[in-house]
Image (cartoon, grey):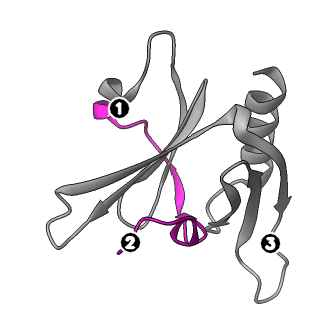
Amino acid sequence: MTSSIANIAAWTFVAECPIPNDIGPLLVQGEQPIAAYKTFRDSAIFTTKRLIVRDAQGLTGKKVEIYSLPYNSINMWSSENAGRILDFNSELELWTRAGHIKINLGKDVDIRKLDHLISHVVLNG
């Protein structure tokens, strides 16, 4: 798997989960974790300064690629809630200096809570 912005478009947040205990070494002074979401292979953590997405790779999952998106690089975002019949997934899209990022959200993710979180960290940051 190559590291490119095209891969970021494939992110899927399955459900909210506890903040991973091992996130500490990734944080800078004064940065605090706010919320975490389970992805297919690892997790995405919203902090007071950025979105960190950890992507475990390989058969054992010991190799981990980490994406870090500072909130000040987000220019615009949109959220779309799921429809009622045969449309169970919501979407969050971010337009950033790095490009356009699309995040699919599982049926157990509260899109409005996530939209409020993005609003809070981007507009207050």
Query: What residue did someone put label 3 on?
Result: 82
Compare marks 3 and 1 and give the one earlier in the sequence: 1
Does 116 sit left or right of 67 as displayed? right
Q: Which residues are magenta?
A: 1-22
Q: Is residue 113 above or below residue 27?
A: below
| 10 Å crowding of disc 3: few (<14), some (14-19), many (20+) | some
Query: What residue did someone put label 2 on?
Result: 2
Residue 91 colored in magenta in the image: no
Does 52 sit left or right of 101 as displayed? left
Using the image, tell me which numbered label, if any, was put on residue 43.
none
Q: CA distance from mark 3 to mark 1?
A: 30 Å
Compare marks 2 and 3 and give the one earlier in the sequence: 2
| 10 Å crowding of disc 2: few (<14), some (14-19), many (20+) | few
Does 53 sit left or right of 104 as displayed? left
Instruction: Say which of marks 2 and 3 sits in front.
Output: 2
Q: CA distance from mark 2 to mark 3?
A: 30 Å
Q: CA distance from mark 1 to mark 2?
A: 24 Å
Q: Is residue 82 above or below residue 31?
A: below
